[in-house]
Image: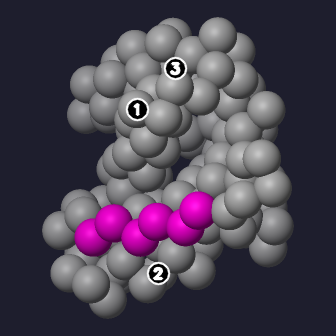
Amino acid sequence: MVEVYIDGASAGNPGPSGAGIFIKYDGKAEKFSFPLGEMENHAAEFHALILALEICVKNNYKVVSLRTDSQAVNQAIEREYVKNKIYAPLLEKALDLSKQLDLFFIKWVPSSENKADELARAAIRLN
């Protein structure tokens, strides 16, 4: 099983944003920081999810357990629904990617346990 932690962050809402991704697999750890440009925090969280899923699909990972500190992203994936329709295309893309995996789990974790938090904040500085 591949463990994936994701986080999106914005300096302002909207503001310069970044995505952080931490992947643990076969005793190895990979860390990613992606600058995202200007966007709202919720959008950054969804972009972090999409980027992480793209990495998993590209690397042919089959069983993925993803952790996020975004309750909005966690609930959107579990319910396959977003209240704010502006995020519907992002959710649709994430769901399409998740269906390319054999098993996909998502779990909410507190920010203090999110290994991608610092990576997302570092990505903001790369904008």
| Residue in front for this viewpoint, 62 or 9 | 62
Residue under the point 33% across and 80% down: 124
Q: Amino acid at mark 3?
A: Ser
Residue shown at the point (37%, 77%) measured from the top left: 123
Residue 70, x across and y down, in percent: 61, 51
Magenta stretch: dominant secondary structure: strand
Would residue 24 be counted in the magenta stretch? no
Residue range highlighted in magenta:
30-35
- Residue 106, image x, y percentages: 71, 32
**Quarter of the rendering containing residue 55:** top left
**Residue 84 in view here:** no
Q: Position of residue 73 (x, y in %)?
A: 55, 39
For the residue labelled by badge 1, is the local secondary structure a helix, a strand or a loop? helix
- Could you tell me which residue is drawn at 40 percent across and 14 percent down? 96
Mark closer to the chain start, 2 or 3: 3
| 96, above or below 89, in the image | above
User: Residue 50: in sight, yes or no?
Assistant: yes
User: Comparing marks 2 and 1, which lies closer to the viewer?
Assistant: 1
* Callout 3–callout 1 Cβ contact below 8 Å: no
In this view, the mark in front (3 or 1): 1
Element under label 3?
helix
Neighbor class of circle 1 (other Cα within 10 Å; few <14, some 14-19, many 20+) is few
Checking the image for residue 98, the label placed there is 3
Residue that numbered label 1 is attached to? 58
Question: Callout 3: few (<14), some (14-19), or many (20+) C-alpha neighbours within 10 Å?
Answer: many
What amino acid is at disc 2?
A: Arg
Circle 2 SS class: helix
Quadrant (top left/top right/bottom left/bottom right) for the N terminus: top right
